[in-house]
Amino acid sequence: MSAAQQARERARPSLPRVPALAVLAHHLVGYRRTWRGGVFSSFLLPVLTVLGFGLGVGAYIDEGVGGVRYLDWIVPGLIASTALQTAIGESTWPVFSNFQWIKTYFAQSAAPLRVGDILTGHLAFVVFRVLTTIAAFLLVTALFGALRSPWAVAALPVVALLGLAVAAPTFAYAAVVSTDSWLAMLLRFAVIPMTLFAGVFFPVESLPTALRWLAYATPLWHGVDLCRAATLGTAPQWSVAGHLLYLAAWVVAGWLLARRAFRRRLVV
């Protein structure tokens, strides 16, 4: 290697062995300046939710659900739905703005980063946000005595997988839409119905057959069933392996779609 080539190699910016970690570090540095704004809501939201739905509405449900106190029954559904909403919040406007407004992705692609590195690093940050939010949720609900099993800690890897299952296809969607109005439509026609009818607030068995199978098709229902099994210490309605494989399929399919969408926007 010539002296000039050696000089160029020394001048080239260094990256971690896993370049996606550099992207994750970028998002963590930004979050370090804004985390205080989310700490209050991370603890206030579960408190208000438990008081409103668990103790407020639950006071009118004498026999609970399936012999379980309504507060204990609804908490795992709220854990899963909070993970869903956190993942969606980090995967819609932030991704759209990185393409359309602040164009961070284009700056990252100009560095020695591949499309997969940019995508994976940002998804890793979404998982970080989901885990920290749900850890706070579990702490608050434990103080209310709403966690009936030590297996409740297993909800953390479940919500991490659920967050990826939701975030990956949402990344693909946010990368191809032309205006942020489409993001609002996603919330209105997908996220809200999923939250209402995927077993968070009432058993899906009370739905008509067609709607019941639509609920089963959503990733949220699988996360709810696994979280409920963990916090109550009971067996899920479906097999654990079946739930995990279904959520993993959403992750893989979503990641492939997102990588394709990102490549079309970033690779000229």
Image: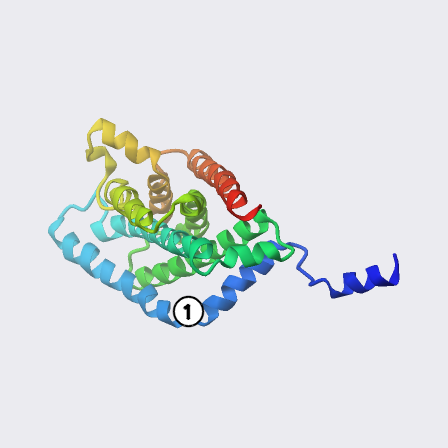
Residue drawn 42% across and 44% down?
176
Q: Quadrant of the N terminus?
A: bottom right
Q: For the view shown, which residue lies furthest in the right direction?
A: 2
Comparing 78 with 9, the one in front is: 9
Q: Is residue 131 in sight in this rendering?
A: yes
- Position of 26 compared to 80: left or right? right
What residue type is disc 1 on?
A: Trp
Q: For the view shown, which residue lies furthest in the front direction?
A: 268
Q: Position of residue 211 (x, y in %)?
A: 24, 31
Q: Position of residue 261 (x, y in %)?
A: 49, 42
> Element at badge 1?
loop
On screen, 117 above or below 244? below
On screen, 30 above or below 187? below
On screen, 218 above or below 268? above
Q: Is residue 144 in sight in this rendering?
A: no
- Its colouring scheme is rainbow
Residue where numbered disc 1 is placed: 35
Residue drawn 52% across and 42% down?
264
- Position of 197 compared to 36: left or right? left
Residue drawn 58% across and 54% down?
109
